[in-house]
Image (cartoon, rainbow, N blue to C red):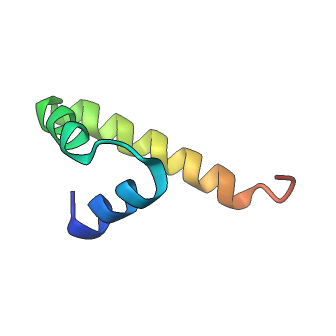
Amino acid sequence: MTDAGYEAVRQHTGLDIERLACVLESLQSEQCERIEAGLTLLFNAVRGNEKC
């Protein structure tokens, strides 16, 4: 994760960044790709939803 990514996570989620990084590093590349795809889908849905 980039420095900007760490900062975004820290500011917007309250997650323990070190723990998150440790978990992400322990995942297989396919799992990371699935997480990224899911987050992208969620982000795009939120951005495109005028009702909320």
Query: Foreground residue, 7 or 25?
Result: 7
- The residue positioned 20% from the left and 32% from the top of the image is 23
Quarter assignment of residue 42 = top right
- The residue positioned 29% from the left and 69% from the top of the image is 4
| Residue 40 locus on image (x, y percent) | 48, 50
Q: State which quarter of the image contains the N terminus.
A: bottom left
Left or right of 35, for residue 44: right
Q: In this view, does 29 lie above or below 2?
A: above
Query: Foreground residue, 18 or 28?
Result: 18
| Residue 41 locus on image (x, y percent) | 54, 46
| Residue 49 locus on image (x, y percent) | 77, 55
Quarter assignment of residue 7 = bottom left
Q: In this view, does 7 lie above or below 40?
A: below
Q: Is residue 8 above or below residue 51?
A: below
| Residue 26 locus on image (x, y percent) | 12, 30
- The residue positioned 48% from the left and 56% from the top of the image is 12
How many numbered marks are there? 0
Most extreme residue toward the right is 51
Left or right of 52, for residue 21: left
Query: Foreground residue, 16 or 48?
Result: 16
- The residue positioned 26% from the left and 47% from the top of the image is 17
